[in-house]
Image: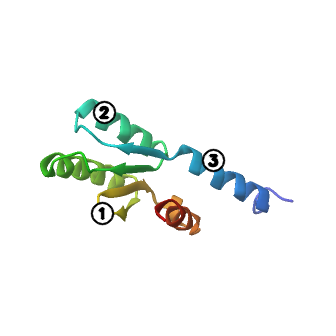
Amino acid sequence: MGLFSKNKKNKTDVVLEKVSTYEKIIFESLSSDDDKYLTKLADKLMDGQPLILNFDKLDIDQANKVIAFLSGIVYAVKGEILNVQEKVFMFALGDVYQDGSMDDFLKEIVE
């Protein structure tokens, strides 16, 4: 093994990474568009924690404000937004979706 050899991950490492990502997911039913609250959510998103947010309790103007703000964060970190249900969205870094396991996880929780 040289200095520039590839670091191969075994299946156990991959499974542990997936579990830790799922454990970090933040599920929130938003009831406010308070700036301090949104900033805390944005900080968590930038730290790599996916957000699954339910916008059902917000009026249209509040929901638009939150989506616009978090969309900017997602763009800045090269992330993605996924519509999980009618008023439920997932905001996450792009690498969360790469292997397809997040899609499988979302299908399980939606059913």
Identity, as a three-letter code, of the amino acid under mark 1: Glu
Residue picked out by circle 1: 86
Do the numbered discs 3 and 1 sit on residues whose CB atoms are within 8 Å?
no
Mark with earlier residue (3, 1): 3
Which disc, if any, is residue 20? 3
Which quarter of the picture shows residue 74? bottom left
**What element does badge 1 sit on?**
loop
Query: Residue at (14%, 52%) from the top-left corner?
Result: 60
50 on left or right of 55 = right
15 on left or right of 57 = right
Identity, as a three-letter code, of the amino acid under mark 2: Tyr
Tell me where residue 70 appears, x and y as whole percent: 30, 49
Identity, as a three-letter code, of the amino acid under mark 3: Ser
**What element does badge 2 sit on?**
helix
The Cα atoms of the two marked residues, 2 and 3, are separated by 24 Å
Q: Is residue 72 above or below residue 32?
A: below
Near-viewer residue (72 or 108): 108
* Figure quadrant of the N terminus: bottom right
Pick out the residue farthest to the top.
36
**What element does badge 3 sit on?**
helix
Residue picked out by circle 2: 37
